[in-house]
Image (cartoon, helix red, strand yellow):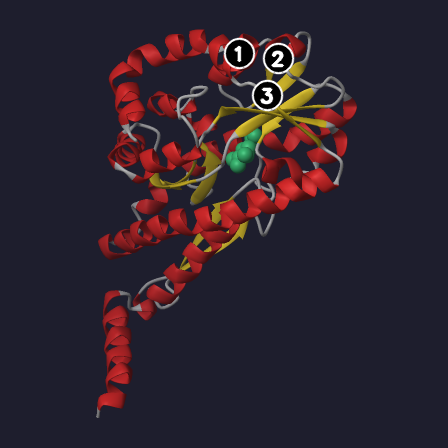
Amino acid sequence: MQNRRPLIQAALCAAIAWAAFPASAQQTITLKAADVHPPGYPNVVAIENLGKKLETATNGHIKLQMFPGGVLGGEKEMVEQTQVGAISIARISLGVLGPVVPDVNVFNMPFVFRDEAHMRKVIDGPIGDELLAKITASPARLVALGWMDSGSRSLYTKKTPVRTPADLKGQKIRMMGNPLFVDTMNAMGGNGISMGHPEVYGALQTGIIDGAENNPPTLYTSNQYTVVKYYTQTNHLIIPEIFVMSKIVWDKLSKDEQALVKKFSREAQMEQRVLWDKSVAEYTAKLKAAGIEFINVDTKPFYDATAPVREKYGAQFAGLMKRIADVK
Ligand code: BDP
């Protein structure tokens, strides 16, 4: 008898799942997910797995189709398409959400987190939950599902290596589309130019810009490493990624389905992190093997130079910034 228990349990679970999601009575919902990163990138994999779990748990009622590699546009366009329901789930950097939901800029400020471990503790805890809730409650028509890791962003340049802020003088450096980042680069000594991720490779190649800033997996998988030479480890931005669902799509889901999406989103957040750590190690090694020169710098002059940015954008978040700093 004992051997049959797992079978009976499985049958019962299936029956309950069937009752909760009678596929025959409902049309299949296909969630359209988008990411600027290519297939195999940790974020893409974690969202695909979220989709597989949803499909299994809803007896095929909900499916997910991934559109990777920026085929649906850059992240600004992705946000807009998600707001109108053309994209169901967008995995984006929190950076580009700043102009839409200004509250998130508290995480977008230079050197706001001490290190990546600090950032993870903050996004996993009450402050992370509060910010997700603020996005959902904002007029942006987005439901914030979860966070992802994007490590630290550092500078890379084509011709002139950067060792101090003075080396950035006259260099045009691409930043993500948010005035806060242009201000950050200008404060660091360069000329910040905002541009969408899909355009950066071409802009570097043709010399419209002299450099950009990002983490090692993005530098490698976007092929930008083939047109730059120096990677200066300033770690000036530690910005979490986020994945959001269109409110229009969210409202079509039942309460049970919404709960499943939330549950699997938290699992995706944790799964991506494991994949992320592996990919940073893998792509750092690949960049070094490809001849990119990694430059270790004293980050203090960059931290000091960006103090006015923290003052300008942080004034409205003073209480929250203190709570972030107090997370040990
Ligand atoms: C990468 C983020 C991606 C951004 C990109 C960028 O994962 O979401 O679009 O940077 O710089 O690190 O635009």
- Residue 297 bears which disc, if any? 3
Q: Are marks 3 and 1 in contact (CB under 8 Å)?
A: no
Residue bearing the label numbered 2: 164
Q: Is mark 2 within 8 Å of ligand 1?
A: no
Taking 240 as reference, is 253 above or below it? below
Report the side of 250 relative to 95 (left or right): left
Report the side of 324 relative to 48 (left or right): left
Q: CA distance from mark 3 to mark 2?
A: 8 Å
Q: Are marks 3 and 2 in contact (CB under 8 Å)?
A: yes
Q: Residue at x 72, y 33 (%)?
A: 292
Q: Residues within 10 Å of mark 2 (few under 14, many from 20)?
A: some
Q: Nearer the viewer, residue 31 or 228?
A: 228
Q: CA distance from mark 1 to mark 2?
A: 7 Å
Q: Are marks 1 and 2 in contact (CB under 8 Å)?
A: yes
Residue bearing the label numbered 1: 301
Report the side of 11 relative to 171 (left or right): left
Residue 1 sits in quarter = bottom left
Is any part of residue 196 visible from this angle?
no
Tell me which amino acid carries mark 3. Val
Is any part of residue 172 visible from this angle?
yes
Q: Earlier in the sequence, mark 1 or mark 2?
A: 2
